[in-house]
Image (tube, rainbow, N blue to C red):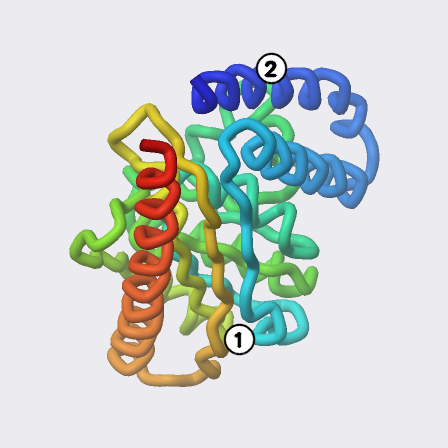
Amino acid sequence: MASLIFKIGFYIGSALILVIGSPLLFGKRAWAMAGLAFHGRFVLWWLKLTVGTKIEVRGLENLPQNPVLIAAKHQAPWETFAFPAILKDPALIMKEELMAIPFYGWFSRKFEMIPIRRERAAIALKEMLKEAEIRKEDKREIIIFPEGTRKVPGAEPDYKPGVIKLYESLNIPCVPVALNSGVFWPRNEKKLYKGTIIVEFLPPIPAGLERKTFKETLIKTIEDKCDVLQKEGEAEKESYLNSAR
């Protein structure tokens, strides 16, 4: 029941924020980004109020001065609204077809997110790198989910070439991000669970590493920490479930 109440409130609240905030489409981008951060904080608050799912952010001291490339694990929809609430001025790499959705897509363009057309392969990659370079000049946090899609906790890692190309092209530090959102917001379940979603910003990988070294370092850093956070989350989740029986 708590999960259903959350989802109803999420969709109604998000729709209201979009409609009421629609004038922001005609103002400064910074104003629209403030609206995006407000939406993220609303969802995090509503998730805690209805389901009891809290958030703990670790390692913010590992974020260097902007610009920075952030490579984050992606396990649940949670990441898409949590990062704008946590970071200062994020630019998320997202599927280009999402830009066509009324309101959502219009605002994504206003936020100057970075679209990628996956079906266009090499051309799409060049366009993404060009857009990312502009966001770098704007000193923003450029966020990419290296596996391109959500993965269940513990799944075999599948990191795509895009994150390597971004790292090489932008020549800026890359901050790996581990999390355990999939423990409490499982991909293949309708139910959400009480507990603490932990997102941890790990020490930055310096610019200029050879691509193989960078990829191996990124994967090991994220996956090892995700394993730790997954165990931590599952222990807390099991404790709550046992107490409810």
Between 5 and 116, the one nearer to me in the picture: 5
- Element type at mark 2: helix
Instruction: Name the image quarter holding residue 56.
Output: bottom right
Frontmost of labels 1 and 2 is 2
Between 34 and 185, the one nearer to me in the picture: 185
Query: What quarter of the picture does the N terminus occupy?
Result: top left
Horizontal side, residue 26 vs residue 67: left or right: right
- Residue 8 at x, y percent in the picture: 52, 15
- Residue 53 at x, y percent in the picture: 50, 40
Horizontal side, residue 84 vs residue 173: left or right: right
Evaluate whether residue 75 shows in this view.
no
Q: Is residue 200 above or below residue 191?
A: below
Residue picked out by circle 2: 12
Q: Residue at x 26, y 59 (%)?
A: 159
Tell me the amino acid under the disc marked 2.
Answer: Ile
Tell me the amino acid under the disc marked 1.
Answer: Ile
Q: Residue at x 59, y 38 (%)?
A: 44
Q: Residue at x 53, y 75 (%)?
A: 172
Q: Residue at x 49, y 77 (%)?
A: 204
Furthest residue toward left: 156
Q: Is residue 114 above or below residue 58?
A: above
For label 2, count other residues whose C-alpha is less than 10 Å away and answer few (under 14), some (14-19) or many (20+).
few
Residue picked out by circle 1: 172
- Element type at mark 1: loop
